[in-house]
Amino acid sequence: MRSLWSLGLAFLLALTSRAGGLEIPLEVEQLPTITVQTAGPVIALPFEGSFSMRCEAKGNPQPVYRWTKDGQAIDPLFDLGVKKERNNGSFVIHSGRLAQFQGMYQCYASNNLGTAVSEEIELIVPSTPKFPKEKIAPIVVKEGQPVILECNPPQGIPPRKIYWMTIGLQHIEQDERVSMGHDGNLYISNALEKDSRRDYCCFAAFSVIRTIVRKTAMSVVVKSSYAIPERRPSLLVPSGVQSEVRLLKGEELVLECIAEGFPTPVIEWTKRTEKLPKRANLKNYGKRLTINNIEEEDDGKYTCEARNSVGDTVHYFNVMVEEPPRWQPEPPKGQLAVVGSDVHIKCSASGKPRPVISWRKNGQPLDGEQVLDDTIVLHRARPEDSAVYQCEASNRHGTILANANIMIIILTCTCPVGKQQMATQKCLSSRNKDDTTESVEGERFSVFKNGSLQINQAGKEDSGEYVCFATNSEGKSAITALLDVKGISDVELSEQKSWSVRLAWVPGDDHNSSTTEFIVEYEESQWDPGTWRELQRVPGNQVTALLTLHGHLNYQFRVYAVNGIGKGPPSNPTDRYKTLPAAPDKNPENIQIQGHLPHQMDISWEPLLPVEHNGPGLEYKLSYRKLGVEDIWKEHLVKRHAFVIKNTPTFIPYEIKIQSRNSHGWGPEPKVVTGYSGEDLPTASPQDVAVEVLNTTLLRVSWTRVAQATLRGHLGGYNVHWLRKRSLLHSNRIPEERHFLTFPGNRSHAMVPGLRPFSEYRLTVNVFNKRGNGPNSDPVTFQTPEGVPEQVPILTVSNAQRDSITLVWAPPFEANGILTGYLLQYQLINETLAMGDMQEVNVSSADTTHWLLQGLGEMSKYMFYLSACTRVGCGPQRMEEGSTVTEASNWRISEAVNTSKNFHLIDGLEPGTVYTVCLLAKSRLDNASIFEDVIQTRVKGKREYLHLGVSTQGWFIGMMCAVALLTLTVLIACFVTRNKGGKYAVKEKEDLHPEVESQGMNDDTFGDYSEENPLKASQCSLDRGMGGDSDYGDEEECQFNEDGSFIGEYSDHKNRGSVRPSPVTA
């Protein structure tokens, strides 16, 4: 009876060899595989009922599905409001608000073994195409001049068709002179008086969404001329001398040339070096060349020539046919492998440009040592390597994705080993385990309990056939393994020719990891002796390489192998091999053509490497001629890798080629490249500059593009300059406010933001190229309309009374028009900022900067809003909060403060009284010019703040007696001293207490106020009520002079009638 282990092994071998084509029964545990998915893109049209996003997979265990939208995880039910089907990941979107569903979707099917990923599905929800609403100025030209009517159709679901008709839906007649371009614009090569009309309309029709839209009608006015001057052709489309066209294989090639001139030019098409393809068609009166289903052989340079009786002009199209990624020859297939084996997953794709390969494992990015370009190498595969591997190939034309299911399975057995085995060889069984009955003799051999055999320091002599026996109660079975110990040796040269040689070698030991490639290196003794450089890479299954060599060099070669772990040691070098001299086999590359000065052309190139000289005496032949004008090449022989051609016309296209040669001959025929001579400043300025003031700060400016011949260089774009000349509110005020904006590209209009309202401006436009700016256009003067004012800079609440408040403000810095007054609004608020009804006051005088609000509630809090107004409207509001008080306050206003001084004296204050002092600017206000603080004057006489009855206290009576006795003693001493001839120091007394009138008017004199900073809040406990007296206890924080007066004993308030305080520095 055949053993179960043998059957299992046979199944494994069959499955491993044909994993890509076998259908594994679902009863067997397996990775998920996507079986059904929606092919994108999906276009959700509003009149269709529903849209399916399909995702079905098989696997064991049953896969679980999840989705991403634009790279972010989503739940179709919670995030999109749609239900997934019960047994798969599909869901259906029903018509409704479709815009939320637009995006890139991807489905993931997972079980505990891995994750399969679908290709991206793009869901497109088209919006209704619309032309922008715009006011288009009439186009005014003289008879014979060209006209371009721009359509700029909106984007939408193709196909899109463009029509030019009148408002009455009559088609605009087209011919060789008047025609619509592929871009949708209408081109008139030379305008005639009959072309004047006011209803040129561009219609865009979208058949899929059943929509037709129309652009605003355009007006053309053609002024008649007595005689139309003849004019040589120039191209309206395309611009420049040469264009590059890239398209996909199988698409339609469309090339178009539309010329202006008088008489009307005719267009002729050619293909360089060969005839036009038979599939080529001419349309649009010969102006458009089309080729359906384009192929690679249609690559090349096409030329259109516009000609009339006056002259001609040409344009060159360089057409390149490319391809999206496609599998070559097929996508990677799934594989079954046993633990310990090497698994190679190869993903090959072709395309143009060459696709970039990226890998994922179960949907997660994968990189590192396992990834070798387009191949993943699983060295000594482990069970955890089982997964779904995704290969993605991308270029600029698209992306393709394939899933490869890789299963690493375990079979176990106990195997006696017959001979020797490479590195580690496992014998596996699914039944009973027995101990090893035989062993391999020698210290280098180790047999493990699970039957694995390990050979240390395996050599060539270990090569041979090894047998693993497995026995159980059902019978006996065996498998055979062949060991071939490899190592790179015997590197030999053969087929030796003048400039080539074949290299052969014997591979070395790959150390149980398959060799993926061999690398051949060379060293030469003439230019860089001792340095090894890579010459060629060879696939791991080849052991020879034909090497193409350079001439006049003395070579030697070596080889080393590469596997999934890394590079091995190199082989021993070969004998020297000397090649014969020869002509160069290549020409310089990376040719750069620049024009640093107007009348010269600088040409540079990448020189040949020394090993590429192929012989002595290397030099270069530079050939050049004017493109499309000259047939004879001008030539120069140079040894350097740069050359300057002088006395060239400004900005003329040239054809240039560079060929290398040495003493043994010329290199191959060089490729021709195109470049331009030096640029110079443009000579013409834009004409017909017009402005349209859209609002108080935004302007639309338009102009006529300058002619290509006057650019004298590559068009950079246009600069718009504007200068604010004056404010219409203050005609004598002329601020120098210069601004400019740069608009790149070939355009004829621009938007200018950031203007100031109610101002007069001057505007100019100039064109620029790489060399610099052209002349400015004639200046255009315009005015911006009146706007709303800026926010008032300050709003202050002052003179709060029981039922009234005074508001003080400053006018706005920029009125942006004629100020008509102010809008004052206010409402009652409480601590929670709950609002009452809004009250409103119109202040109709522009000169008013304060307002008394009466009829307010006592002890109430209000929010005030103030905005300045012009005839256009009111500007932004300034808010301020204020409250009424319980007792009325009586504000006194001083005379005007002398602005040349930094202090002011206040007369007529009461002693021992608390005052609020406010400093207000009489003209313009700002945050720094408003000041308010509380001060207290000193008390004259005895300290009234002492408790009543203190004079009856014993300690007080004793202290007063002691003071009286001490005073009497001092007086007696002074009297005796005077009688003896001494003088009382009155002068010193006066120096200590000078009169106010005698004090100098300087900053130091007025620096102190009651030993405190004069305008800081008093440190005494004060009642904020204006004019109220305060009762004080035993507080000692307030400082007074010795006799309790405010100024001193030399300021007699009885005679003056008021107390004169120390000056206060504002």
Image: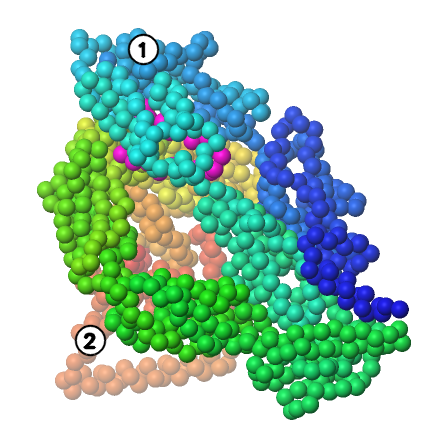
The stretch of residues the image draws in magenta is 236-258
Q: Position of residue 378 (x, y in %)?
A: 61, 67
Q: Is residue 324 visible?
A: yes
* Type of amino acid under label 1: Ser
**Disc 2: CA contacts within 10 A as few (<14), some (14-19) or many (>=20):** few
- Quarter occupied by residue 411: bottom right
Residue name at image x 85 percent, y 69 percent: 3
Where residue 841 is drawn, which disc sits there?
Answer: none
250 in the magenta segment: yes
Can you say which quadrant of the picture contains the N terminus? bottom right
Q: Position of residue 247 (x, y in %)?
A: 44, 37
Relative to 238, residue 75 above or below: below
Can you say which quadrant of the picture contains the C terminus? bottom left
Residue under circle 2? 988
96 in the magenta segment: no
Where residue 196 is drawn, which disc sits there?
Answer: 1
Residue name at image x 27 percent, y 34 percent: 241
Q: Position of residue 458 (x, y in %)?
A: 59, 83
Foreground: disc 2 or disc 1: 1
**Disc 1: CA contacts within 10 A as few (<14), some (14-19) or many (>=20):** some
